[in-house]
Image (cartoon, grey):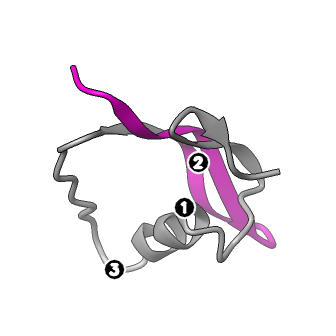
Amino acid sequence: MGEMILQVNHLSKSFGTHEVLRDIDFTVNKGDVTSIIGASGSGKSTLLRCINLLEQPDSGDLLLNGEKVNR
């Protein structure tokens, strides 16, 4: 296992009553190639927007190089 670059823990995001992301967990290690696949409307873009802090997740943690980057 390599050096962990990104860690997503229990990420959730809703828009009103529509739950887009529910309890997402994954890690990306240095040198990994990661793909996000899914049907249209499954939350891929919302996940990327949360990781890039263009959207604030409702709950969960984003850690970059071990340091929490969201509220």
Residue 22, disc:
2
* Residue 13 magenta: yes
Earlier in the chain: of badge 3 and badge 2, it is 2
* Residue 35 lies in quadrant: bottom left
Q: Quadrant of residue 49?
A: bottom right
Q: Earlier in the sequence, mark 1 or mark 3?
A: 3
**Looking at the image, is mark 2 or mark 1 earlier in the sequence?**
2
- Spot occupied by residue 37 in the image (x, y as percentages of width and height): 24, 64
Marks 1 and 3: which is nearer the front?
A: 1
Residue 32 against residue 46 in the figure, above or below? above
Q: Please name the amino acid that badge 2 sits on.
A: Arg
Q: Amino acid at mark 3?
A: Ser
| Residue 29 image point, x, y percent | 29, 36
Mark number for residue 51?
1
Question: Foreground: 67 or 45?
Answer: 67
Quadrant where the N terminus lies?
A: top left
Real-space Cα separation, disc 3 to disc 2, in angstroms? 17 Å
Binning the other alpha carbons within 10 Å of mark 1 as few (below 14), some (14 to 19) or many (20 upward) gives many
